[in-house]
Image (tube, rainbow, N blue to C red):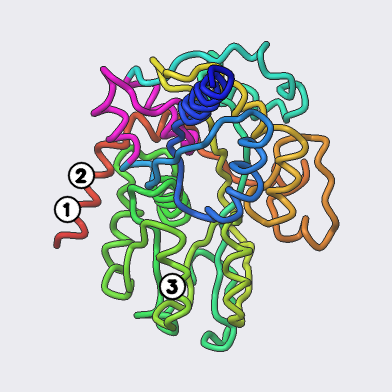
Amino acid sequence: MKKILTIFLLLILAMITFCAAKLNVSTWGFNLDLLDKNISKPFLERYGIEIVRELGNNSVRLTKLISQKNNPVIDVVHFADYYAVLALKEGLLQPIDVSKLKNYAEIYDFAKDPIGNNYGVGYTVYSMGIVYRTDKIKGPVTSWKDFWNKEVAGHISLPDITTTQGPPLMMLFNQIYGGNAYDPELKAAFERVNQLKKNVVTFYKTSSELINLFKMGEVWMAPVQRFSWGQFLQTGLPLAWVIPQEGMLGFLNVISIVKGAKNLEGAYKYIDFLISQEVQYAQAMDLVDSPVNVNVIVPQEIAEKLTYGVDHIKSLIFYRTDFIVENYDRWINKWNELIAQ
């Protein structure tokens, strides 16, 4: 009887220990089925740690982190690079001891310390081009200026300023129409978007929202992130990806450890797992994320759908994150005023 009781108690203890092994991760709510397949399930099997996700766009999740600053719930956070800088500015992150990451040497140099002082590691790079319905739009789309064409009026969508892509796209518009991406006021961009807003179905906040608008036939053309291209193709719609003549925007997603993280050991395991050749390859093959691990090699038919290869990455337009962070609040206020008019 004592032996049975001992075994029973050991089983309960094991269950309690297993249940307690959780890692709270703040990330986006896109491609969750593939994230489970490539990351959550194999991570749980290897380390016995369950990944618990808090979902939302950059802005929403940053606000939550700020509200939890004195008693953080989240251990690890995924951000676009300039949102990671915003989080750092708020004192929400702690430095990463990269000596604990065995796969760190395998990633591109530009991904190793993207926001300075090892407060984040880049784990995926991606571009943003234009996607349009080839059955709805007759003329070839070749430029970012094509959003102002009458042919597409009432059937376009642009990212909201609070999304990852919003501020850099506005900087690009300012470069195209005002000759200077680094104008703190973005005067030309705001003037042009003000002229365009009546023709915009919505200023989208998530990729899933935009895909649904394409499915319903409401949107025919929009700026699209490369990581969601696979999902767009799965709709079966006649779509084309355009590399605009002015160039594509480039983005780097960063993973950081939250200051005061309760599962620090799990956080390091997770980051190292995420940048491993194994996971980076799986994510690339499923068209979820473009790899920063230099040892990842994918077939040509997959590479064509990713932000892949040194030459491709070098061709992208990257804007300075410090400039975006410095002017972010100003642009948000101007945007809210513009949309409310």
Mark 1 and mark 2 in contact? Answer it, CB < 8 Å: yes
Res. 337 mark: 1
- Circle 3 crowding by C-alpha within 10 Å: few under 14, some 14–19, many from 20: some
- Cα distance, mark 1 to mark 2? 6 Å
Residue labelled with disc 2: 333
Residue labelled with disc 3: 212
Circle 3 SS class: helix
Residue 189, image x, y percentages: 35, 54
Identify the residue at image location x=29%, y=58%.
191
Amino acid type, mark 1: Glu
Amino acid type, mark 2: Asn
Which quadrant is the N terminus positioned in? top right
Identify the residue at image location x=67%, y=40%.
42
Magenta residues span: 61-90
Mark 2 and mark 3 in contact? Answer it, CB < 8 Å: no
Residue 272 in the magenta stretch? The answer is: no
